[in-house]
Image (cartoon, rainbow, N blue to C red):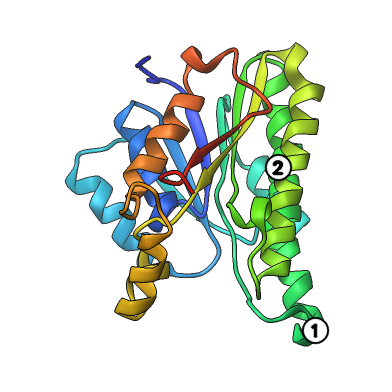
Amino acid sequence: MTDLSGQTAIVTGGTRGIGAAISLALARAGVRVRATYHTGHEGARSFLTRGAKEGLQGLSVHAFDVADPAAVAAFFGGLEGSLEILVNNGGVRQDALLGMMPQEAWERVLAVNLTGAFNMCRHGVRAMMAARYGRIINVTSPAGRVGVAGQSNYAASKAGLVAMSRSLAREVAGRGITVNCVEPGYILTDLISDLPAETLDGFRAAVPLSRFGQPEEVAAAVRFLASREASYVTGAVLSVTGGV
């Protein structure tokens, strides 16, 4: 796959779980990676330590809330040089049945997962347009495609993210910028690793490949879409679900 050396990437939610795997995969390909996060300073320090042990250069972490337009503007205002890759992976869940969902749970999930990606994309495309090149990859979920009981806010945010991505792909195609989605399924991260064994068995049984995915398998899909070889792929959703 193409050497990505010399390129710069931003990965939101990029210091743990799937996001950390994406950040490290891009760094191993020679990319300068700016991994963002909102909370979890200790996790961010651990992420940097992991990268340092691998001898990876150009990794940095940045703490701000992607749902805050002023914070996003300040972050982009402090960037120097070009931007070739933007990965919107940051997201939150606040589950509840719709009839009992607090208003703030609906608003916060939409604000981070959808409006946060909008905030990042709005500044990202401006940074990419002058060079007439860019790769935007938004991380979605099967919840936005099939729905999940108790996750109406999360599902709506992810379905909206796909629609936004496809619209943006049409808007910026003439500038050499592609916009795609990666849709992870059941991936073995902290989000599911502490669930009861019977719950995990039920999830695993629903996967045609009969296993959970690894964060690195999602990262490989992102790396492909970030490459020059993916120049004719835009407005697509690449499922990394084991067949779900």
Q: Mark 1 points at which residue?
A: 99
Between residues 215 and 47, which one lies in front from this camera angle?
A: 215
Seen at 51% across and 55% down, the residue is 13
Q: Name the residue under label 2.
A: 162
Between residues 161 and 176, which one lies in front from this camera angle?
A: 161
* Residue 151 picture quarter: bottom right
Question: Could you tell me if residue 23 is visible in this image?
Answer: no
Q: Position of residue 85 (x, y in %)?
A: 55, 30
Q: Is 9 left, or right, of 23 in this rendering?
A: right
Alpha-carbon neighbours of circle 2 within 10 Å: few (<14), some, or many (≥20)? Answer: many
Task: Give the quarter of the figure containing the N terminus.
Answer: top left
Seen at 30% across and 77% down, the residue is 197
Q: Which amino acid does label 2 sit on?
A: Val
Q: What residue type is labelled 1?
A: Gly
Q: Which mark is residue 45?
A: none
What secondary structure is marked by label 1?
helix
Seen at 51% across and 69% down, the residue is 39
Question: Could you tell me if residue 231 is visible in this image?
Answer: yes
* Residue 68 picture quarter: bottom right
Q: Where is residue 102 in the image (x, y as percent from the top left)?
A: 77, 84
Residue 102 vs 57, above or below: the answer is below
Sooner in the amino-acid sequence: mark 2 or mark 1: 1
Between residues 178 and 100, which one lies in front from this camera angle?
A: 100
Between residues 204 and 123, which one lies in front from this camera angle?
A: 204
Seen at 40% across and 53% down, the residue is 207
Please report contact status of discs 2 and 1: CB closer than 8 Å, yes or no: no
Direction bottom: furthest residue: 100
What secondary structure is marked by label 2?
helix
Alpha-carbon neighbours of circle 1 within 10 Å: few (<14), some, or many (≥20)? Answer: few
Q: Position of residue 78 (x, y in %)?
A: 62, 42
